[in-house]
Amino acid sequence: MWSELILKIIIILVPLIISIAYLTLGERKGLGYIQRRRGPNIVGLYGLLQPIADGVKLFFKETIIPNHANIFMYFLAPILSLLLALIAWGVIPYGPGIVLSDLTLGLLYIFAISSISVYAILISGWASNSKYAFDGAIRAAAQMISYEVAVGLILITVILCAGSFNLTKIVLAQKAIYYLIPLFPIGIMYFISVLAETNRAPFDLTEGESELVSGFNVEYSSISFALFFLAEYAHIILMSTLGALLFVGGWLPLLMFLPIPHGAWLSIKVVVIVFFFIWVRATFPRIRYDQLMGLLWKSYLPLSLSAVIFVSVILIGFNGYLFCF
């Protein structure tokens, strides 16, 4: 039993780590082409070995520990950050019945794990004994907690339509129509909120180079920095996969006549969503911190709350059959 469970975990984690590595290459290549340059193209054919070279470089660099840092908490933060980013994948379904643990409250589980990840960033900023790191950690905590409120309300609208917290049931509820079609404005709000929650441009205020150098991870190097780096990109892929499951039918095929496996359909949709992360980074400038918080509390919070009320009224008025076929 344990050997089978360990094998399943390895089958999930190995492709995930490879995806994270080549997402970094894809992002640098994408940014390069958008900015009319080549991007990495030296290490390996077309730069395909660049992620491996970067990983080897980070793992063999010297680990520099700041003076007066809390050693235990300093090293706990990156480990906790990566661990939380990985264990959330245990409830992600890749196809009908292809899931490590098909929890009834799977969506609530992911939301709880995402909330706990704030503590890893706070610990890193406090344990580093640096004003830049601490300021970046406070920014990150305020930003992530704030936008989790909007994401939670957005997820409630999907839960109301599907009538379940189970991710498999949410996907199967979209056989007649993808939720992105009737809930298109909510899907756009989800994507923008996820950009802020994952600290991505134009909401990368936690890593504002002009005032914070590198934010909460400024005092980390070598393996510790690599763990934070892996956790960030794992979270991006997780949020993209969650968006694909909630709004565009997960593994359900777009075109029924194409002989493409279920997992491939899910991968295609995730890649498209991840591309929008890269596109936004290359296109939009960083906004001010007051604009970031004002966008949530003055716009997204009332809009997402109104969406919950509107969807509830529509579903009750039409006996739940308008969106939930």
Image (cartoon, rainbow, N blue to C red):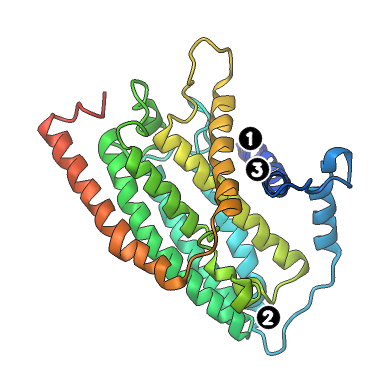
Foreground mark, 3 or 2, reads 3
**On-image quarter of the N terminus:** top right
- Give the amino acid type for the residue marked by disc 2 in the picture: Ile
Residue at image position (50%, 69%) is 140
Foreground mark, 1 or 3, reads 3
Image location of residue 216, percent across then percent down: 60, 73
Determine which residue is flagged by label 3. Answer: 16
- Give the amino acid type for the residue marked by disc 1 in the picture: Glu
Residue nearest the viewer, comparing 245 with 164: 245
Residue nearest the viewer, comparing 105 with 142: 142
Residue nearest the viewer, comparing 45 with 236: 45
Determine which residue is flagged by label 1. Answer: 4
Res 177 seen here: yes
Left or right of 24 on screen, residue 139:
left
Task: Examine the rendered structure and indicate whether residue 216 appears above or below residue 155.
Answer: below
Of label 3 and label 2, which has the lower sequence position?
A: 3
Q: CA distance from mark 1 to mark 3?
A: 19 Å
In the picture as drawn, the residue positioned furthest to the left comes out as 317
Residue at image position (37%, 39%) is 104
Please, what secondary structure does the residue beneath circle 1 have?
helix
Q: CA distance from mark 3 to mark 2?
A: 29 Å
